[in-house]
Amino acid sequence: MELSPEGVRHFSRREFGGGLLARVSWPILVGLICLFVLMAPWLTWRGIAWSQSQAYDQLTAAGRDRLKLYGTALHSELEKSRNIPLVLASDPLLVAFLAAPATPDDPRKEAQAAALDRRLQALNEALGSSALYLLDTRGLTLAASNWAEGAGSFVGQNFDFRPYFLAAMEGRPGRYFALGTTSNLPGYYLAMPVRQGERIVGAVVVKTAMDELEHGWSGGGEKVFVTDRHGIVFLTNVPGWRFGSLAPLEPGVRQRIQASRQYGDAALAPLGLVLGSRLASLGGRSYVMVSQSLADGEGWTLHVLLDVEAAEARARDFGLLMVAGAALAVLVIGFFIHRARLVHRHTRELEQRVVERTAALVDSNHRLQAEVVERQRAEDEVKAKQAELVQATKLAALGQMSAGMAHEVNQPLAAIRSFADNAVTLLGLGRPEQVRDNLAEIAGLTERMARITGQLKQFARKSSGAAEPIALGAVVDGALSLLAGRLRGEDVDVRWAPPPDDLKVWGDDVRLQQVLINVIRNALDAMRKAAPRRLTISLAVDETTVRLDVADNGPGIPDEAMPFVFDPFFTTKPAGEGMGLGLSISEGILRELGGRLTAANAAGGGAVFSLSLRRAEAS
């Protein structure tokens, strides 16, 4: 409620004239003002302290959220290379090469090593890792992906002093972050023992660079770093902190680290970080520090430092605002007391002077309110910028995840192009009905692409992923239509009798069609040298299960390859024609849908892939 001069005049005449406030003496009024002056520093300190505490709590909560985001990014980076040495350690060629006795100047051994060098080089380029190499039980590098780099090659280098090699020789995975002794570049090393039966015959090692991860951390605005069990910083978005320590190292620890050459010739000097009860200080600046131990590394800890300068500035402003409000309250009380005394002692002329002073006070209050509104607007703008920064970080992570969907989107794009080209041809031939059909197919494929790309929403929120009843015949027809051009071009005899429309299975039509396309393409690849080429798709139905068999008349699957058909990176195709991921992905999709994908050789020749699916009610 605003206080107008007329209101003051009316209120004072009725309430203050001869009242309690009018009888307040000047000594009491001066005493109240002195009390406020004495309490003003305490009130300011309490207001700033409370506001700072609230700001620190908010920064701590924000730091925990950022900590989860950065921890997830680090976990994802480590997970990319976790299965590579595990798969390679069971490779029969690598096992046989390491198990064979070393013979000086053996041409066969050298030829095998050269073949392994090229294979590791191709796999390293496909996976995007820094290096892949193979060690014998002495720690000597027998084959490496960087074999062609001359002096920078790992081949012939001995790494028996590295902890990851020692762990592999003890029969367990070895994890280690260090500077490369040959490349002098930092990286995360993951080693797996290679066994022949119960005997360890060597180790396979993958090195992953972390520079892209550190670069991605630089966009958040806060300082992020990871320390090992000794408190040494080895991952950070502040280059000057790398290989510094949170506290001085004991001489014995320093000697062990330097002996292992984990961080090369780095001085491992303390950063000068001082930890307090609420804040940490470094280089003359104060930070809120949030830390979390990581399960991925061995004694690793992830830290986030958030600068408190802006928060403390807001806290000081709030404390000053509290003092200003208290001062305003004292002034208002003093004004009413003084005015009551004037009304009691003086004439209307003096009362008019009080009204003028009241008007000036009201104007001052309006200006103060305007300043408060402007400050609130500035704080709202800062919060909006922070929200934009969080959204940009999330979109960057979504952009990284969308790269994995390109493989599934390319096939509908190619089909759309094919249907569009056919439509142009059919228009020239004056066949509008078939053009309309092609356009309908394009519309269906665009809808399918939308459903495929919709899986990116799982990063922001986890979808139910529940299967639903779908018509199996329509899925098969759709897959055959996408591959119709290749089927016609390779003169393949397709034998397929569509079932009734009411035959439904539990699944997802997009992912199930992707599985079927992968299986049919593998069959077409297998029949390249067959004449004639025949693809047979048949059904076996019972009360609960529908089995869809895809058979070809190719050479079949070799007996020695049968156990590894669904293993990642396993392929019988020539080099450069696949990485061996299609069947592994298809098997995982069917498993998620509650089904199963199996492979066998037909009695009359050729391979048979069987998709076992749960049958759904016709209704």
Image: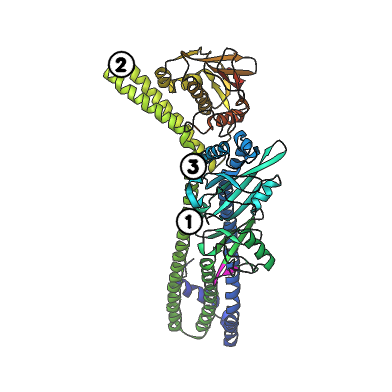
| Foreground residue among 249 and 478 | 249
| Foreground residue among 41 and 245 | 245
| Span colored in magenta | 280-286
Q: Residue at x 57, y 85 (%)?
A: 30
Residue at image mark 2: 431
Q: Vertical placement of 320 versus 618: above or below?
A: below
Q: Position of residue 27 (x, y in %)?
A: 59, 87
Give how far apart the Cα atoms at labels 3 and 2 are.
Answer: 48 Å
Give how far apart the Cα atoms at labels 3 and 1 are.
Answer: 28 Å
- Is residue 597 found left or right of 170 in the rendered image? left
Q: Residue at x 55, y 34 (%)?
A: 569
Residue at the far bottom in the pictured view:
27
Residue at image mark 3: 125
Q: Of the residues under marks 3 and 1, which one precedes in the sequence?
A: 3
Q: Position of residue 150 (x, y in %)?
A: 48, 50
Residue 281 highlighted magenta (yes or no): yes
Please, what secondary structure does the residue beneath circle 2 have? loop
Q: Vertical placement of 8 versus 581: above or below?
A: below
Q: Of the residues under marks 1 and 2, which one precedes in the sequence?
A: 1
Q: Main secondary structure of the magenta part?
A: strand
Of labels 3 and 2, the one closer to you: 3
| Foreground residue among 192 and 247 | 192
Q: Is residue 231 visible?
A: no
Q: Residues within 10 Å of mark 3 (few under 14, many from 20)?
A: few
**Residue 502: which quarter of the image?**
top right
Query: Residue 219 got which mark?
Result: 1
Residue 54 highlighted magenta (yes or no): no
